[in-house]
Image: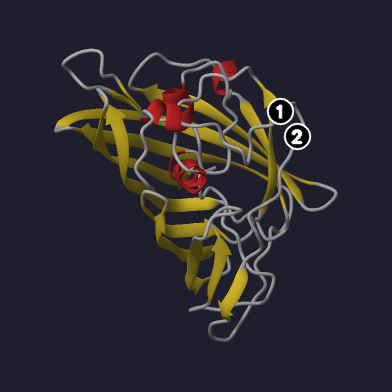
Amino acid sequence: MGATDRSVGERGFGAALLVAVLAVLAGACSSDSADDATAPTVDATTDTTSITADDPPDPETEPESEGAESGPPGRAALLDAGSEPRVTLTVAGEADTTISVSAVDDRSATVDGATTDESRSAEYDVAVEIVSGADGFELLVAPAVVTIDGPTPTADEIGTLRWYIDPNGLTQRVVPIRGPRTATRETLALFNVPNLVVTTPVEAVGAGARWSQPLETGVDATLLYTLNNVSDTDLDITIELEAPVEGGTLTIEVTGRYDRATLLARDVTAVSTLEFDSPVTADGEITSLQGVWRSERTYTEVAG
């Protein structure tokens, strides 16, 4: 990202970095309002420099009107089919399940030696209903708060989403179906659930199989999947990415077990980290904004 004579608030991030931030903090199910979206801004009106880093809107999932949609990032490409026996991994059919989520979002930004840290955490249950659709499956995704380190949002503030996925778990689009989603951006970010569903190749695969998938449309970054083991009930999977993005580096690490019949997380930890170093203008002088945005989700299937 080149130097600029505009403030970071006026400039915003480059398009590639915006999408990377979404992948880190928003995943595949954000539908916030675009009216209050801002890039990190520098407050140079006092002796203390402060940073705000509100999430930008998610172009993948934020409809201009209800029912709007955008294209998926791209189908998985098989790199190695793995060992025999090989099986095709698809959603088996309709199901109902509940997944417990532990969510932590940390942000740190430094300008001219002054550092601002923010952290939010929450525990919540996500009820997921899978029903057959015309071209695949529809997932009704409804979070319910257990604990949160701040005011407890109502169900309408959090909202309910309908995901449209193909039989291999590839998200086609996400549509909000309930709630104005009026909670703060930081609160809404906690209820995003990236990597809740795993994407699989259309080909049959066995233990040791590897496949790739573009992170997002228009971003030169690719997720690498490794199928460590497959049983009648579980998929032991690792997902990795470390890629330069405009102004920084994006890292994604996902490990754990997915349900073979639903492709939903059963016992999974997902960590996304964006480290960036960007020139900004504060008090008329070009300086550097360094930051780390980290998002961690732990998914545990609720028994029964």
Q: What element carries label 2?
A: loop
**In which quadrant of the rendered view does residue 65 lie?**
top right
Q: How crowded is mark 2: few (under 14 residues within 10 Å), some or many (20 or more)?
A: few
Q: Residue at x 50, y 32 (%)?
A: 56
Q: In the rendered view, tell whether residue 1 sits above or below residue 64.
A: below
Instruction: Looking at the picture, tell me which residue is in the foreground, 263 or 64.
Output: 64
Q: What element carries label 1?
A: loop
Instruction: Looking at the picture, tell me which residue is in the foreground, 197 or 112.
Output: 112
Q: Residues within 10 Å of mark 1 (few under 14, many from 20)?
A: few
Q: Which residue is drawn at 27% across and 25% down?
A: 284
The amino acid sitting under disc 2 is Ala
Query: Is residue 73 in view from this perspective?
Result: yes
Tag of residue 64: 1
Query: Is residue 163 in view from this perspective?
Result: no
Instruction: Looking at the picture, tell me which residue is in the foreground, 249 or 281.
Output: 281
* Residue 137, horizontal then vertical, whole percent: 75, 49
Looking at the rendered image, the quarter that the C terminus falls into is top right
**In which quadrant of the rendered view does residue 211 lie?**
bottom right
Whether label 1 touches label 2, CB < 8 Å: yes
Q: In the rendered view, tell whether residue 230 sits above or below residue 82.
A: above
The amino acid sitting under disc 1 is Glu
* Residue 13, horizontal then vertical, whole percent: 44, 38
Residue matched to label 2? 68
